């Protein structure tokens, strides 16, 4: 054992960057795979909140926490096809070589022995631009604290002389004197933090002004690494820092910030909190924000709805967890949008407070459990939920795509309420109303939406025709007032014939009577009718042939559908199902885009996607997402990530 240790130590002395950058490089190597595959989640170390949450500013844009469990990473690398597995290995090796091997470090020797069960990457909110030199008379001429850049990094110059780096000091220095503002008080264990309702939590911090965001700036990131084995960390730290230049130290708010210079010239700022948590960032201002939060400023744990959301999605042995501050995300999106009209057209979607989700791995693929919640002053969400979805019995097993909801009326009412009186954008409710009135001479809400208060579904069904783009689009709806629905259909028949010059004919399909709307030259055929006494349908092309009088095998009996839509949620307000494999094979019937080679490998690795949603309370939406993968055992053993 002695010889290998000597060799390892000698190698480390060539790259005296320090334990902290070694940890950063090691974890970011793993994080590269997460970013590439858009995965999220893991349980927290020493509490129910994710690692670093108590010291992450409440206005952070996003946090991603992921497991360091090697078994889960091995399971991830075994999902998908051999092509997608090779792509993942390539990506992981790229980050390993760039961030570890190039610095004489290995994950197995330099990070794994001491790091905790999970690590977190926090993406900070963009720094607002400076306040104009000549503010308006009624505006505050004093810049907001959020506009100030690093208070000490910009005003102080590091001393040129190098202070000796003491590896004992960084892991054994006593915690700062308790002034009552330590984040340890916000660990979620006190009674005052016990799962408060979302609409009773504190109000969020001021929303960023998109006009004060530079869309070209790179957002700061902070990496949080828990120290699970201090003695192991101490020993490795001593080896890595055995020779070479020492870090530069400076004080900020009573906390020592150590700055290391990488071989590429990057300056890495590092802080250790209470000998338990390492925070690293290339931006000194970001580290100072973290220290301010540690000293008592609000953290993401204090953000409205955060605690309840994390508790909602926490699952045993999760692989990754993500949190997105929707208010900050909205500001960033607006800053990157050049058209003011397009920004205003998103008004109906601008009431979300946050998004949180966890990802677990299973032999069939990935399962994502998530939640979104609205701001306190937003219109409430409809509470329509049901314990079964009857329309899956009416659709054929070969259905390629399906999106369903428990009530189209509730969905429309919520969309209209969130949009308000805006008329910006084609999808503004007022504009949709006006267009429907102009084309059909009917009032959308009074004549159509009013009786659509039951389950509805929009589905894509393959057609028996060999013609290009002949897959059939079908709309099903359970009418709560069938008589009103029949009157509406009669008026629609008249509008199609007199206003749009369609041929309207009575037809019989599978022994059931229906009505056909056919455009000039038979370019488009739409069929409407009833599947039973309460379920109406509107179908394009020949999709009705596989539904009438009833499917040979219903979608509800399709094994792939059952796997994709299986959920722990007792009730449901909506369902989504996509048979990705079938869609990819139906390029002769639907305009499936041709993906580049790398994206094609990912698409081919997915068999199906299923989503189940449920409304909880009046401001929270929960969802289960399953990604069923095409799994194949790769003949090539994954290369070592050491």
Image (tube, rainbow, N blue to C red):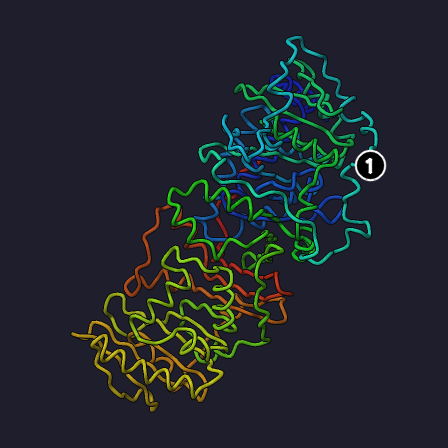
Residue at the spot of label 1? 180
User: 598 left or right of 384?
Assistant: left
Quadrant in the picture for residue 127: top right
Q: Position of residue 28 (x, y in %)?
A: 58, 35
- Residue 198 image point, x, y percent: 67, 57
Q: Position of residue 315 (x, y in %)?
A: 67, 56
Is 138 placed above or below 11 here? below
Residue drawn 70% across the image and 35% down it: 293
Work out whether residue 310 can be spotted: yes
Vertically, is 278 above or below 621?
above
Image location (x, y in percent) of residue 515: 30, 85
Q: On the rendered structure, is 449 left or right of 597?
A: right
Q: Nearer the viewer, residue 190 or 612?
A: 190
Q: How many marks?
A: 1
At numbered mark 1, what does the secondary structure look like: helix, strand or loop?
loop
Viewer can see residue 396? no
Q: Quadrant of residue 196?
A: bottom right
Q: Name the residue at the front extreme.
A: 137
């Amino acid at each position: 054992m002695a010889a290998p240790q000597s060799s390892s130590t000698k190698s480390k002395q060539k790259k005296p960057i320090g334990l902290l950058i070694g940890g950063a490089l090691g974890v970011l190597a793993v994080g590269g795979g997460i970013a590439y595959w858009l995965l999220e989640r893991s349980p927290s170390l020493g509490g129910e909140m994710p690692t670093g949450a108590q010291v992450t500013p409440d206005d952070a844009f996003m946090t991603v926490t992921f497991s360091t469990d090697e078994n889960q990473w091995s399971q991830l690398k075994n999902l998908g096809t051999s092509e997608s597995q090779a792509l993942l290995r390539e990506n992981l090796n790229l980050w390993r070589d760039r961030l570890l091997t190039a610095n004489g470090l290995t994950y197995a020797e330099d990070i794994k022995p001491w790091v905790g069960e999970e690590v977190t990457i926090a993406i900070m909110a963009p720094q607002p631009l400076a306040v104009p030199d000549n503010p308006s008379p009624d505006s505050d001429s004093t810049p907001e604290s959020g506009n100030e850049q690093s208070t000490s990094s910009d005003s102080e110059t590091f001393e040129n002389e190098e202070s000796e780096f003491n590896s004992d000091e960084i892991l054994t220095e006593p915690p700062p004197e308790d002034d009552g503002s330590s984040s340890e008080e916000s660990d979620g264990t006190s009674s005052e933090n016990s799962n408060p309702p979302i609409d009773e939590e504190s109000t969020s911090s001021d929303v960023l002004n998109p006009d004060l965001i530079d869309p070209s700036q790179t957002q700061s990131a902070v990496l949080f690494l828990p120290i699970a084995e201090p003695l192991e960390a101490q020993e490795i730290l001593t080896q890595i820092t055995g020779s070479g230049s020492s870090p530069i130290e400076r004080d900020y708010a009573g906390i020592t910030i150590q700055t290391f210079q990488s071989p590429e010239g990057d300056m890495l700022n590092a802080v250790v909190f209470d000998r338990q948590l390492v925070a690293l960032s290339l931006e000194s201002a970001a580290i100072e924000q973290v220290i301010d939060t540690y000293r008592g400023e609000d953290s993401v744990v204090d953000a409205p709805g955060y605690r309840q959301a994390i508790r909602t999605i926490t699952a045993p042995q999760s692989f990754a967890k993500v949190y997105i501050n929707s208010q900050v995300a909205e500001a960033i999106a607006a800053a990157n949008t050049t058209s003011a009209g397009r920004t205003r057209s998103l008004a109906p979607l601008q009431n979300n407070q946050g998004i949180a989700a966890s990802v677990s791995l299973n032999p069939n693929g990935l399962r994502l459990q998530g939640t979104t919640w609205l701001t306190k002053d937003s219109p409430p969400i409809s509470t329509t939920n049901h314990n079964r979805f009857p329309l899956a019995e009416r659709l054929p097993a070969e259905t390629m795509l399906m999106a369903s909801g428990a009530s189209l009326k509730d969905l429309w009412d919520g969309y209209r309420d969130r949009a308000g009186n805006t008329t910006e954008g084609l999808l503004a409710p007022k504009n949709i109303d006006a267009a429907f009135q102009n084309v059909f001479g009917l009032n959308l809400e009074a004549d159509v939406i009013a009786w659509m208060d039951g389950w509805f579904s929009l589905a894509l069904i393959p057609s028996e025709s060999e013609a290009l783009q002949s897959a059939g689009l079908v709309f099903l709806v359970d009418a709560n007032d069938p008589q009103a629905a029949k009157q509406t259909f009669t008026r629609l028949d008249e509008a199609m014939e007199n206003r749009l010059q369609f041929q309207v004919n009575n037809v019989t399909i599978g022994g059931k009577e229906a009505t056909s709307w056919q455009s000039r030259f038979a370019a488009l055929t739409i069929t409407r009718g009833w599947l039973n006494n309460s379920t109406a349908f509107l179908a394009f092309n020949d999709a009705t042939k596989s539904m009438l009088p009833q499917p040979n095998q219903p979608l509800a009996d399709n094994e792939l559908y059952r796997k994709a839509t299986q959920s722990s949620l007792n009730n449901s307000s909506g369902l989504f199902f996509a048979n990705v494999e079938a869609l990819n094979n139906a390029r002769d019937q639907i305009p499936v885009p041709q993906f580049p080679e790398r994206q094609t490998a990912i698409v081919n690795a997915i068999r199906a996607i299923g989503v189940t949603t449920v409304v909880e309370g009046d401001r929270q939406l929960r969802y289960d997402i399953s990604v069923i993968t095409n799994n194949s055992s790769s003949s090539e053993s994954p290369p070592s990530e050491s």
